Image (spheres, rainbow, N blue to C red):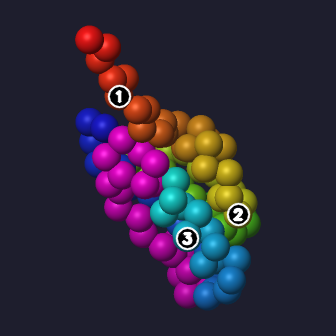
Amino acid sequence: MASELRLKLFIAGDSPRAREAAENLARAVRSLVNGAAHVETVDVLESPDVADEYRILTTPTVVREAPAPRRRVTGDLRDTAQVLAALHLFPATPTPTPTP
């Protein structure tokens, strides 16, 4: 990717659902070409002002901040392909092996 991938994961407290969403997001990021992203976790219970600024209505929600434009996906983030598609990110594709 030409610019740095920055994501915000919005959760509500330290719950099994929040931990599962974080693990699912990490798995999705690992499937990207370079697997590098800056992921910031925002607990809406501790930072309601940030949640308001981003208009977060449900958790977990992921917002792609960069590269622009912003994209978002909400849910348990279990389906990696769906998460990446919603965020307009694409997984690494295997390099074809040259045939002799």
Q: Tell me the residue at 68%/58% (across/down).
A: 78
Q: In screen coordinates, is 95 left or right of 89? A: left
Q: What is the spatial separation of the Cα atoms under label 3 and label 2, in whole angstroms? A: 9 Å
Q: Return the disc, 3 or 1, that comes first in the chain's sequence.
A: 3
Q: Tell me the residue at 48%/36% (across/down).
A: 90
Q: Is residue 50 magenta?
A: yes
Q: Which residue is mark 2?
A: 76
Q: Tell me the residue at 42%/45% (across/down).
A: 32
The amino acid at mark 3 is Ala
Residue 60 picture location, percent across and down: 66, 67
Q: Which residue is mark 1?
A: 95
Front of the two marks 2 and 1: 1
Crowd band around label 1 with a 10 angstrom C-alpha radius: few (<14), some (14–19), many (20+): few
Residue 40 picture location, percent across and down: 42, 69
- Residue 97's quadrant in the figure? top left
Q: Return the disc, 2 or 1, that comes first in the chain's sequence.
A: 2
Q: Is residue 9 magenta?
A: no
Q: What is the spatial separation of the Cα atoms under label 2 and label 1, in whole angstroms? A: 30 Å
Residue lying farthest to the front in this orientation: 100
Residue 22, numbered label: 3
Q: In screen coordinates, is 14 left or right of 50? A: right
| Closer-to-camera residue (13/15) | 15
Residue 54 picture location, percent across and down: 56, 61
Q: In screen coordinates, is 75 left or right of 35? A: right
The amino acid at mark 1 is Thr
Q: Return the disc, 3 or 2, that comes first in the chain's sequence.
A: 3
The span picked out in magenta is 29-52
Residue 70 visible to an observer of this rendering: yes
